[in-house]
Amino acid sequence: MTTQESYYYGTGKRKSAIARVRLYPGGTGTVIVNGKPLEEALPWIDWQKRAMQPFSTISAAADRFNVVAKIEGGGVSAWADALRHGIARALLVADPNLKRELRSHGYLTRDARIKESKKYGLKRARRAPQYTKR
């Protein structure tokens, strides 16, 4: 990985996954996630497509930027959505005119659904202990 001075930064979140994304302009389209290529970090093709959706939505080609992301927490599916959110936010920093299109596809909205916390007296968040009549 080469060190370049200028980049666009965006933070993406999904469940407990946090993606810190840097977009380096004038790149070749390489995507590095936690020091690994995208295909190795997100092995399922649908996760890869989901992560790269902001590039396919806007008319700009993905090969204009190199993407370097550090993701921690959560699972692999949440990584893909956090990466998508981070890329969209970084593209917004790069070009504020893209806000309308990215917002209309929902890429700038943080998905707030998280795991519901366990309640006392219950086995899980809502599962009560089994009732016995006798």
Image (tube, rainbow, N blue to C red):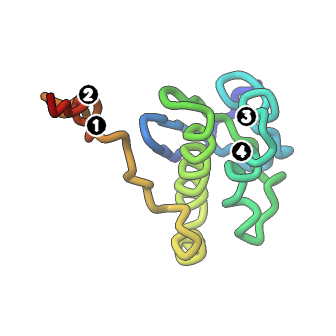
Residue drawn at the location 58% of the way across and 29% of the way down: 70
Question: What kind of element bears circle 3?
Answer: loop
Please identify the quarter of the rendering in which residue 35 is found: top right
Q: Which mark is residue 123?
A: 2
Q: Nearer the viewer, residue 76 or 68?
A: 76
Task: Identify whether 28 is placed above or below 40.
Answer: below
- Characterize the local packing of mark 1: few (<14), some (14-19) or many (20 or more) Cα atoms within 10 angstroms: few
Give me the C-alpha separation between circle 2 and circle 1. 5 Å
Position of residue 85 measured from the top left corner of the image (x, y, whole percent):
54, 52
Question: What kind of element bears circle 4?
Answer: helix
Give me the C-alpha separation between circle 1 and circle 4. 31 Å
The residue that mark 3 highlights is 42
Give me the C-alpha separation between circle 2 and circle 3. 33 Å
Task: Identify whether 1 is placed above or below 110.
Answer: above
Q: Nearer the viewer, residue 25 or 107?
A: 107
Question: What kind of element bears circle 2?
Answer: loop
Q: Are marks 2 and 1 in contact (CB under 8 Å)?
A: yes
Residue type at mark 4: give it.
Trp
- Nearer the observer, disc 4 or disc 2? 2
Give me the C-alpha separation between circle 4 and circle 3. 6 Å
Q: Nearer the viewer, residue 114 or 22?
A: 114
For the C terminus, the quadrant is top left
Position of residue 61 measured from the top left corner of the image (x, y, whole percent):
81, 61
Q: Which mark is residue 47?
A: 4
- Nearer the observer, disc 1 or disc 4? 1
